[in-house]
Amino acid sequence: MMTTAQYLRQIENYDNRIKNKLIEEEQLSSLSTSVSAIPVGEKVQTSVKRDPMGDMVAKIFDLREEISKMISEFLQKKQEIVRTIEQVEDPLLYDILFKHYVEYKSLVRIADEMGYSEIHIKKKHLKAIAEIKKIKGFER
């Protein structure tokens, strides 16, 4: 069972996984430009000839498809979570949730930006989490 904080952190988790996949894709693309055709000698082989460049292109294509799917899932999940946060009626609690879970800001930074003490924002954050818990019907 997912906790309320885990539910809200899904946006950042998706975002991080997508960023990592994009790095992986960039590395693969870079590697593909450095791979030259491997010369095939005159000797007769019983195995099927490998096409390293073709294999690399196929891997890049598959990775791009995976990234595209992840982005689509990310956008759906983000929209769902933002709509959940928007159900919080208290504007301060809404702002804290949005800044923390959608903009990925720390509670310390939020306190600084909003002109409140860190302790005050942490208490309000706990109250905001309780609101989401109630909205979503989470046990934890």
Image (tube, grey):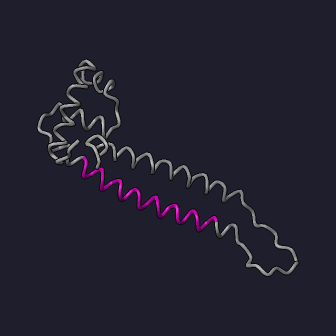
Residue toward you, 58 or 131: 131
Is residue 74 shown left or right of residue 41?
left
In percent of width and height, residue 72 lies at: 36, 59
In the rendered image, the residue lying farthest to the left is 89
Residue toward you, 84 or 32: 84
Residue toward you, 124 or 134: 134
Specify start and end residues of the magenta stretch as a single range.
56-81
Residue toward you, 35 or 46: 46
On the image, which quarter does residue 68 sit in?
bottom left
The reply to whether the magenta stretch includes residue 76 is yes
Q: Is residue 124 above or below residue 32?
A: above
Residue at x 64% of width, y 54% of height: 30
Residue at x 34% of width, y 32% of height: 105
Residue at x 26% of width, y 38% of height: 98
User: Magenta: predominant secondary structure element?
Assistant: helix
Is residue 107 shown left or right of residue 62?
left
In percent of width and height, residue 65 lies at: 47, 64
